[in-house]
Image: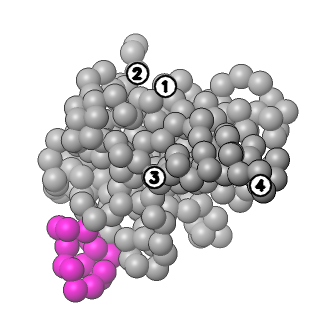
Amino acid sequence: MPARNRIKTYVENSFYHIYNRGVEKRQIFMDEQDIGVFLSYLKTYLLPKDDKVLKNIIADPRKSYKEKSMASRALLLNNFSSELEMTAYTTMPNHFHFLVYQTAPDTIDRFMNSLGTRYTMYFNKRYKRVGPLFQGLYKGVLAESDEQVLYLSRYIHRNIRSLPPELQLRYPSSYPVYLGLAKQEWVKPERVLAHFSKAEYDSYREFVEIEDMDENNKEAVTLSKVALDLLDLA
């Protein structure tokens, strides 16, 4: 049976819920270093790259070989800052969730291919393994309304609650950014927070942290349309 939620049609200027897990449900983040590397890749891809500055470093005779080498590698890396926004994310031991907004119809595919290939190369080198790290192609679902976008951000930020309390602080998410407790310049919460009170962060916090509702409520109906495979991620 073909896997569900694999993006077949890309729409520009739209939100997508993107997620994937480790092959055979294996752990993809073994420690804080792995998580840090993964987040550093996101930062590199999603913050604007100043090609002029990098070229000046390479041409500057006063710069060291290491500085020139790092600038050369950075110059060659893909960059998606003008085409894709990371609206929300969470990391888990064996999977991750992104809520992204793309402005070009093929950005997500290029972004996820770059991220998946680069992180797999890092992971395999560090742990002396070969073969794929992720379970096939990433999954993606188009969010078709503002309501779906809001509830997806809630779902992503609540995902970490499924972990034991002692592990919840180990796996980062964009939730502290939404609450004004942290700053990650490559996370763009504005499109979601625009639907909440501008005076304080408590209105979004209340939206995320209210008790779970029953299966007949609006949230369950909304998420059923955009996250059909999620129950099998654990």
Q: Secondary structure at mark 3?
A: loop
Q: Amino acid at mark 3?
A: Pro
Q: Earlier in the sequence, mark 1 or mark 4?
A: 4
Report if residue 8 is visible in the image.
Answer: yes
Q: Quadrant of the N terminus?
A: top left
Specify start and end residues of the magenta stretch as a single range.
Answer: 193-207
> Label for residue 48?
3
Measured from the top left, where is residue 179 in percent x and y? 38, 77
Q: Secondary structure at mark 4?
A: loop
Judged from this view, the residue extending furthest toward the right is: 128
Measured from the top left, where is residue 149 in percent x and y? 24, 52
Residue at position x 20%, y 68% in the image = 194
Residue located beneath label 1 in the image: 137
Q: Amino acid at mark 1?
A: Leu
Left or right relative to 200: residue 41: right
**Picture quadrant of residue 94:** top right
Depth check, mark 3 against mark 4: the one in front is 4
Depth check, mark 2 against mark 3: the one in front is 3
Residue located beneath label 2 in the image: 3
Residues at marks 3 and 4 touching, judged by CB atoms closer than 8 Å: no
Report how far apart the C-alphas of labels 3 and 4 lie in the structure.
22 Å
Residues at marks 1 and 4 touching, judged by CB atoms closer than 8 Å: no
Report how far apart the C-alphas of labels 3 and 1 lie in the structure.
27 Å
